[in-house]
Amino acid sequence: MKERRYPLGRHARDTVRAQSGRPLDALTLEQARAGKLSADDLRIHPDTLREQARLAAEAGWSQLAANLRRAAELADMPHERVLAIYEALRPYRVTHERLLAMAAEVETEFGAVETAALIRQAAAAYRQRGLF
Amino acid sequence: MSLSRRFQERAERPIHRDSFVTPWPEVGLIVADSPNDPQPSLSIAAGRIVEMDGVPRERMDLLDLFIAEHAIDADMAYEAMSTPSEAIARMLVDINVPRSRIVRLVSGCTAAKLVEIVRHLNVLEMMQAFAKMRVRRTPATQAHVTNRSDNPVLLAADAAEAALRGFAENETTVGVARAAPLNALAILVGSQVGRPGVLTQCAVEEGMGLRLGIKGLTSYAETLSVYGTEQVFIDGDDTPWSKAFLASAYASRGIKVRFTSGTGSEALMGHADGRSMLYLEARCLLATRGAGSQGVQNGSISCVALPESLPGGVRAILAENLLAAMLNLEVAAGNDALASHSDIRKTAKLMCQFIPGADLIHSGFSSMPRYDNMFGGGCFDSSEYDDYLVLQRDMQIDAGLRPVREPEVLAVRERAARSIQALYLELGLPPISDAEVQAAVKASDSRDMPDRDRVTDLAAADALLASDFTLVDMVTALDRAGYSDIATAVLELGRQRVLGDYLQPAAIFDREWRVQSGLNDANDYAGPGTGYRLQGERWAEVSDLPEALPPERYLQGQGDRPSERLAELGTAASGQAPEVVIAVGPAFGRALTETIGGLPHEAVLEALIYGIAAEGLAARIVKVYHSADCAFIGYAGAQISGSGVAIGLQSRGTTVIHRRDLAPLNNLELFSMSPNLTLDSYRQIGRNAARYARGLPVTPVPVTVDNWVRLRLIVKTMLLHRRECEQVDPQRLPVELHFDWEPEV
């Protein structure tokens, strides 16, 4: 099965859509010329990331698959929000409470369950190691 | 100062500019097996790791906690930890144990267990294991593209050349950090000119790196650095969790991610905790795997000279590459920063990755002269391309590069420079002049480039980063500027982001944008006849060096105009007079007309005859048909010489003075170094032959000894001899020749 699905660029061109929802075949130079291509047309759709995660997991790369599932959760998040979370996770940036709050926010606003779990785990580890 | 010249000369060799030190385990100055390294252990309670390598959960540091949570497969742990390390080491080199079995076992190993496994392997075994364990079947390599002045035109031209030469990825960095957006733009465009499908990145601070990726200015990120001790990790301004989040952030924008680690960094940064470099690297690799990175750049990287200063350093560097591959990570295997002053040493080290093959053999081969390398100098640089190409051809190994011709290189350089010039104009960036374009085409390094206004360029870079510029703007601007094919390639980069196929392990693109990764190009090495083999069209391409001439080129001009002054008279009779016979080879003066040293046959004959005449004797010339061998030609001449003395002369110029009473393979004097013979030498040979004939004392002809001659001219020697052999007629007796020339002595 997996041999036939990967690469998506060969076996699933018809079904892959950009983050904007437009199909891959619509992403052409003519569209760009006509001013009808937006930045979101060249962003990956969360469903595609989930599909790549499935493919990675089936082939034995379970940690990569988890990463791609977290990526799927971030795919619709604004850039600045992503950058802000990264910044908050760096050493000595924010309080334990702030990290937990961020976890709750991404969970409720974006359904980012796995990302939230990662942030909570970081919060616990940082507290154990005195990183706040 | 050495006591003797013998030692002084060696002391001045490049190897003695490298640093060597004796181990000091307490500060981490030891490559492997520090007395402070822990023993492997793992305890699991209710599916949760509660103790690892001797550290209970409550005393775990950030790395331990992260590794325990993310990197070790608890389901495999019991089997992995209870299988003797030596048994796993043997599986690594056993062609009957598939890669997948080892990958599963390794997924349950702690850092100390990993180190214990590779401890059993010597370098040869590690190379064999690496060939089996690397992720992608097809090997590839990566280029550095930088320069001291962050010159965008030169960056674009160099990136294009690197792409044309076969690099799968091009990596730049900055002289001045603010230049990053424009440097990234230059190599992105240049690379797509050289060969569509090449991935590019710009190594800068993590936050900046992510911004560049989001804007579409890079398509992969490599410098997500991880370290093996908690303190150094924090000093790097990250934690395993922030790095894991960063990896997801990149993937969420369709950008390939590779982490960076490498032996020696912790010791260099002062917090190795007394552990060996390899043990700390094993922790880095587990953190990398746990974070979900598809791969890693390791092999010591910028610290390489530190492990190499210690016993076993090169072995340890190969061991860290192997550990990464065992953990199912793509490996960009180092061979990037300056590792040694000695070409022998750095090449020997390279062979550890070059021979087994790697997903990326270099994590940066300097595609420009070392002078312009902003990544620590470039262990290999553009001056060594041709050496590298010869090594590929010598060993029938695909190490990622292809031979190119100068005109095609200059053509892509020009196109890249023109397209970045046009793009700057379209985007309102500081103008690029025609003079800059012209300079970039032929420049060797940034000293050949006109100066640019750095202040304006950096301001433009700031503005670009702050603007809402995206990949789409790049596409439309290139198209408007008349470079629709490059616009199409850049757009395809965007479409590939939408597909995400290249987020999978060890993914690269070929020139048709076909992705090759661990999922569809999985390494299937299982012994002889399996795995990647360099053959077919690719082998023909690798073999086709510009300097490899067709054989006929070596004989150009030979025999085109046979001597008109030499005429065959009939079977040679035995002479009676006190003469010297000059016996020439069967091709002499006809099928061949010059010696290997380029002396015309007629001039050589004149010189010999002159020398003989100068000693008062006459020369008689005969052509020997039954042999092409110098000794037998001379021997045959001696048999019919009135004096018993003859000069044997092969058409390529090799000469012997022979005498009738000697055994065929004996001689009076032999001049085997024919390329070094001058007309003066031949005159002297003539004189000596005559003096032998007259029974006078003889001083041997002085000859130049140049041992490189054989090396330089062996192909020509072989081809000249083959042509001489073609003229051999075993049944034909020696023929008398008339030579239309009289010496004036």
Image (spheres, coloured by chain):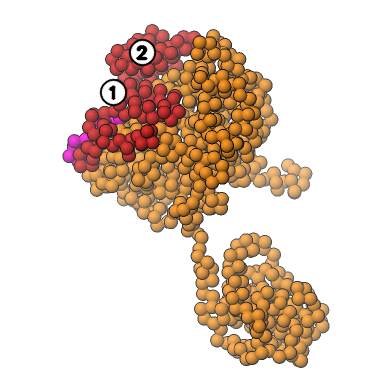
Residue at point 61%, 31% (across, down): B89
- For mark 1, name the chain: A
Q: Quadrant of the N terminus of chain B?
A: top right
Chain A, which colour?
A: red
Q: Position of residue B232 (x, y in %)?
A: 52, 21
Residue type beneath disc 1: Asp
Residue at point 29%, 30% (across, down): A43
Q: Position of residue B509 (x, y in %)?
A: 39, 41
In the drawing, what numbered circle is on residue B289? none
Report whether B141 appears left or right of B53: left
Which residue is tagged 2? A103
* Magenta stretch bounds: A32-44
- Residues at marks 1 and 2, CA–CA distance in whole angstroms: 16 Å
Compare residues B701 and A17 and report the one nearer the observer.
A17
First of labels 1, 2 by sequence position? 1
Which residue is tagged 1? A76
Chain shown orange: that is B
Q: Position of residue A115 (x, y in %)?
A: 37, 18
Q: Residues within 10 Å of mark 2 (few under 14, many from 20)?
A: many
Residue at point 51%, 60% (across, down): B548
- The answer to whether residue B455 is magenta is no
Report whether B389 appears left or right of B675: left
The quadrant holding residue B342 is top right
